[in-house]
Amino acid sequence: MTTYCDHAATTPPRPQARAALAAWLDAANASSTHLAGQAARVAVEESREAVATALGCSPHEVVFPSGGTEADNLAVKGITWAARDRSRGVPHVVTTAVEHPAVLDPARWLAERGDATLTVVPPGGDGRVDVEEVLAALRPETALVSVMAANNELGAVNDIPGLAARLAEREVPLHTDAVQAVATLELDVARWGVDALALSAHKFGGPQGVGLAVLRRGLPVVPLAHGGGQDRGVRSGTFAVGLDAACGAALTAAVADRAELRPRLLALTDRLAAAVTALEGGRRSGPSDPSWRLASHVHLLLDGVEATALALELDAAGVAASSGAACGAGAAKSSPVLEACGLQGTPLRLSLGWTSTAAEVDRGIDVLTDLIPRLRASRSAVVR
Ligand SMILES: Cc1ncc(COP(=O)(O)O)c(C=O)c1O
């Protein structure tokens, strides 16, 4: 039996998503004019409407990219390029050192090729980004600010509505990567006041390979892919009918569950954290105030425990967890997020989700409370 504590990497698909995917697996091309094509198109558009209802935006603002990475790239590159085309100068981009590579890498790439200048704002020690520091980085030519809603490693939540309000006064567009936030945080695009937002379906109970980009109506965005002009020309390519339908079904289910899920997960993650921090050498990282912490995430730093041994032993004991972020090559390497926060120790991220149960958490606690002291003891035996 696996104790699955890696929902931040991927959360299991919800039954509604499985059903929608199965129903539209053999869909016709949604751009075809025949009846089967029109039926497929209706499925895509109904899903888009469901997404818009769930997120508090207009269906015209919703695009279905291949996931969070493409949604982030579309916002970062597309908005910056559109600004460059308008001004004929070099636009300035502001982002943060705790962003996922899906934001940080395209931002750096733009800067390396001279398409933008870049300011990367450092986080506080808890992984949160200070609104005033972001505002202090603005220049007259700033064309985009990209700040994540919640960090994938630490679960630190940023004040996106507060930042959006201040940026609106200066007419600077704000993109937020809300990939980790949407499953447990109240998210309303209109109330948040953001101009662009990225989501990934496999983080909220949809299938892998589809995501959501919300782009405020009228916001100029240069597309990444040119072709058939689907998705209002912002994202060319044959509609992935089954994936798009499953994405909307999963988001609707996730949003319906959210108010109940959050307190349930907060209690479970606090129990996990309490058990590990009671052990010698175990510390919890991220914000201490639970209102700035994702209910789904526990990030721990373990002193005197070797990272590779921890990963291997957890796996052997049937606990699926992450000793950093799981999006890279899977190799244990130091985390730029932890470095930016000035944090040291062997990281362990335990992330829960909609299928998590108290029994599963209890089993995880049993494994960890046995394993961590053993690993510390064997490490100190070797050091001596
Ligand atoms: C915060 C964040 N942004 C973007 C992504 C990338 O999403 P996807 O896997 O759908 O490309 C991830 C994935 O882990 C993430 O955690």
Image: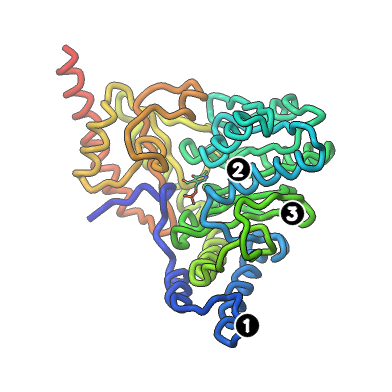
Identify the residue shown where x is 20% and y is 21%.
Answer: 379
Identify the residue shown where x is 59% and y is 86%.
Answer: 34
Q: Residue 182: horizontal and vertical position, in percent?
A: 56, 53
Q: Residue 21: horizontal and vertical position, in percent?
A: 45, 72
Query: Of residues 183 and 112, which is closer to you in this image?
Result: 112
Nearer the camera: disc 2 or disc 3: 3
- Find the distance from the CA under tag 1 to the CA under tag 2: 40 Å
Residue 192 visible somewhere in the drawing: no
Residue 280 visible somewhere in the drawing: yes
Residue tagged 2: 149
Identify the residue shown where x is 60% and y is 40%.
Answer: 148
Q: Residue 256: horizontal and vertical position, in percent?
A: 56, 65
- Residue 375 placement: quadrant: top left
Count neighbours of disc 2 (C-alpha within 10 A) and say few if under 14, some if 14 to 19, many if 20 or more: many
Residue tagged 1: 33
Amino acid type, callout 3: Arg
Residue tagged 3: 216
Among numbered discs 1 and 3, the one appearing first in the sequence: 1
Classify 53 as above or below 299.
below
In the orientation shown, which residue stands out farthest toward the bottom?
35
Q: Residue 151: horizontal and vertical position, in percent?
A: 53, 39
Among numbered discs 1 and 2, the one appearing first in the sequence: 1
Nearer the camera: disc 1 or disc 3: 1
The secondary element bearing badge 1 is classed as loop
Q: Is residue 337 left or right of residue 38?
A: left
- Find the distance from the CA under tag 1 to the CA under tag 3: 29 Å
